[in-house]
Image: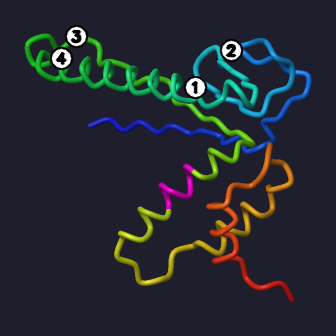
Amino acid sequence: MRESVASLTVDDSDPRDPSARCDRCGTQGTIARAIRHSEPLEIFRYCINCWPAAQEDLERRQTQELNEYHQAWRAWDSERLRDPKRERPKPPAPWSGNSRSWSDVQRFLELITAKLEEIPRTTPPPFPEIAAEIQATAAQMVGHMPAEVAEFLAKYLPPSA
């Protein structure tokens, strides 16, 4: 059995770019970046107004690419004994993205808190560390902090000295 290893460098640099144009509406000034790690690299930038819908579209595209790959893999797997020269399908290129959108922070907190609370643990969930990271980037975020995020920070940030 062959093994394959993929390496991906995560870019957590500030996705805001005041001179970039939104790939959806052309507005100057972006708060989000999505990258398809393909050859050539595809980089998409979005303004605050376009990001939520663009994010949904990109996630739908990723899901479609993954479904097509799984379908091709199943077809290859069922035929490979009859046709050993048939080429194995290649997985879709990975994606990464980041933004300075509070809606993404809210979404992350909803996902992570639900998952971490349902997993049996021998140590407490890393909520204080997550809260500290959110607090550290709060000044870079666009707009006002939502109440749900503020409540999370109030609950998990250590008291100020």
- Helix, strand or loop for the magenta stretch, by majority: helix
Q: What's the distance in space between the residues labelled 4 and 1, CA to CA? A: 33 Å
Marks 3 and 2 sit apart, C-alpha to C-alpha, by 42 Å
**Element on which disc 4 rests:** helix
Q: Residue furthest front?
A: 147
**First along the sequence among labels 3 and 1:** 1
Q: Amino acid at mark 2?
A: Arg
Where does label 3 land, which residue?
85
Residue 42 within the segment the image draws in magenta: no
Residue for point 83% across, 84% down: 160
**Residue pointed to by mark 2:** 24
> Which residue is drawn at the image coordinates 69% and 21% (left, top)?
43
Quick one: label 3 or label 4, which is nearer the N terminus? 4
Judged from the image, the secondary structure of the residue bearing numbered disc 1 is helix
Q: Earlier in the sequence, mark 4 or mark 1?
A: 1
Secondary element under disc 2, as helix, strand or loop, is loop
Name the quadrant containing residue 153: bottom right
Q: Residues within 10 Å of mark 1 (few under 14, many from 20)?
A: few
- In the rendering, which numbered label is found on residue 75? 4
Can you name the residue that lies furthest to the right here?
A: 19
Q: Comparing marks 3 and 2, which lies closer to the viewer?
A: 2
Find out whether the residues at labels 2 and 4 contact each other: C-beta distance under 8 Å: no
Q: Which residues are magenta?
A: 107-112
Q: Report how far apart the C-alphas of labels 3 and 4 lie in the structure.
A: 14 Å
